[in-house]
């Protein structure tokens, strides 16, 4: 998910709020110029109206006026320090701002809170989302190659969302833990009765707490999660601290032909193959499976991605299972 549309947070001025909503009506009808005029009127009444600045930036961007778009996104960023809308990402996409190491927690949380109720249908029906199945097949392949059945004592589902990956792996796991930044997504997951434990937290904080408590997992999965993180180094290092000595980690990413991490027009990050191999190596994780995989489609075309399965480089024995 990447395009949430403008988020309404009141400006404190009822007339400005009314004009903002009126502008969105014009925008929905395809009247970009009319919507921009009305937003300008709203901003004259409420100059710190971040939502209106952001919507105006999107309109100027669609109209091909980069300079005006940059100015509007800068005003949205300055008026809303928590960056609910992702103005910093838009500025980075337009080459007018720094590409940050991670997206702001506020932005990602509201992105998925907003989509939680219809997430499963949107992903599976409209975007042909296949990350859980791809990960399951990759993990099973690695396990079979090690001469073991695909059965695990404990699994950590990073960025578990509504539980799509949890559903794919639940039959093969004795103890399933899920963590997600979005309370609304975690609430949807809870209704499915898949998880033995669910937490709402950012990934790095959760992993640090798990490492401090000496928690160890036989399987760690991240399905379509790392597309929201530019720098995977800290995450990979944290994974290495909570993975069992004979455990494995599996994840999907979007990719590109370059070597590093890249912010895409969709406002998701793509990671190059050399970058991923370097990150895994630096974290002390050895790659057991690395393959191209299209985890979703967008606008009728498959999205270029990779599926990776890794294990601790110090592992001296076959991957263990709880039921093999």
Image (spheres, grey):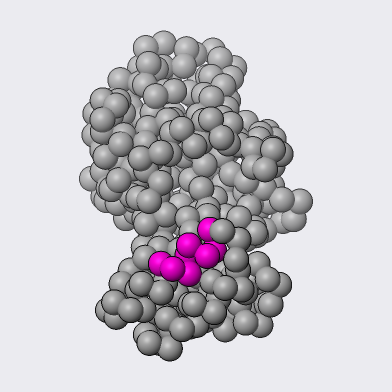
Q: What residue is drawn where x is 42% and y is 54%? A: 111
- Please tell me which residue lies in front, 209 or 50: 50
Count of numbered circles in the view: 0
Residue under the image location 48 percent in, 23 percent down: 319
Compare residues 28 and 183 and report the one nearer the observer.
28
Residue 60, given in percent of the width and then of the height, sits at 62, 74
Front residue (pair 269, 248): 269
Residue placed most toward the observer, 40 or 8:
40
Q: Is residue 272 left or right of residue 252?
A: right
Residue 25 shown in magenta = yes
The x and y percentages for residue 318 are 50, 21
| Residue 141 coordinates in the image, percent (x, y) | 58, 19
Q: Is residue 117 above or below residue 55?
A: above
* Most common SS among magenta residues: helix
Q: Answer whether residue 195 is magenta in the image.
A: no
Give the residue displayed 31% in from the left and 72% down from the top: 10
Percent position (x, y) of residue 275?
Answer: 65, 53
Identify the magenta region. Answer: 21-28
Q: Give the residue at the far right of this rendering.
A: 257
In percent of the image, x 26 and y 43: which residue is there? Answer: 199
Q: Is residue 243 visible?
A: no
Quarter that holds the C terminus: top left
Residue 65 visible at all: yes
- Left or right: where 259 falls relative to 58: right
Up the image or down, 227 lies above or below 145; here it is: below
């Amino acid at each position: 998910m990447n395009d949430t549309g403008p988020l309404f947070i009141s400006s404190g001025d009822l007339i400005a709020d009314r004009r903002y909503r009126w502008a969105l009506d014009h925008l929905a009808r395809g009247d970009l110029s009319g919507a921009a005029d009305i937003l300008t009127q709203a901003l004259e009444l409420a100059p710190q109206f971040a939502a209106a600045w952001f919507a105006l930036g999107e309109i100027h961007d669609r109209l091909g006026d980069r300079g005006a778009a940059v100015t509007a996104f800068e005003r949205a960023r300055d008026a809303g320090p928590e960056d609910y809308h992702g103005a910093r990402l838009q500025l980075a996409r337009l080459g007018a701002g720094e590409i940050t190491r991670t997206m702001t927690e506020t932005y990602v949380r509201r992105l998925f809170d907003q989509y939680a109720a219809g997430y499963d249908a949107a992903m599976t029906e409209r975007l042909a989302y296949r990350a859980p199945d791809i990960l399951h097949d990759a993990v099973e392949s690695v396990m079979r190659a090690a001469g073991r059945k695909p059965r695990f004592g404990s699994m950590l589902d990073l960025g578990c969302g509504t539980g799509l990956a949890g559903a794919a792996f639940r039959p093969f796991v004795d103890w399933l833990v899920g963590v997600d930044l979005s309370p609304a997504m975690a609430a949807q997951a809870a209704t499915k009765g898949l998880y033995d434990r669910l937490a709402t937290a950012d990934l790095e904080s959760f992993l640090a707490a798990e490492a401090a408590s000496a928690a160890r997992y036989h399987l760690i999965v991240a399905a379509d999660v790392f597309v929201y993180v530019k720098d995977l180094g800290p995450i990979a290092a944290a994974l290495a601290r909570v993975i069992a000595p004979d455990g494995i980690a599996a994840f999907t990413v979007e990719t590109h032909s370059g070597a590093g991490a890249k912010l895409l027009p969709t406002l998701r990050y793509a990671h190059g193959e050399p970058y991923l191999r370097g990150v895994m190596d630096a974290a002390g994780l050895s790659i057991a499976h690395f393959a191209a995989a299209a985890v979703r489609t967008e606008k009728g075309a498959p999205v270029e991605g990779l599926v990776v399965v890794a294990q601790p480089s110090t592992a001296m024995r076959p991957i263990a299972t709880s039921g093999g």
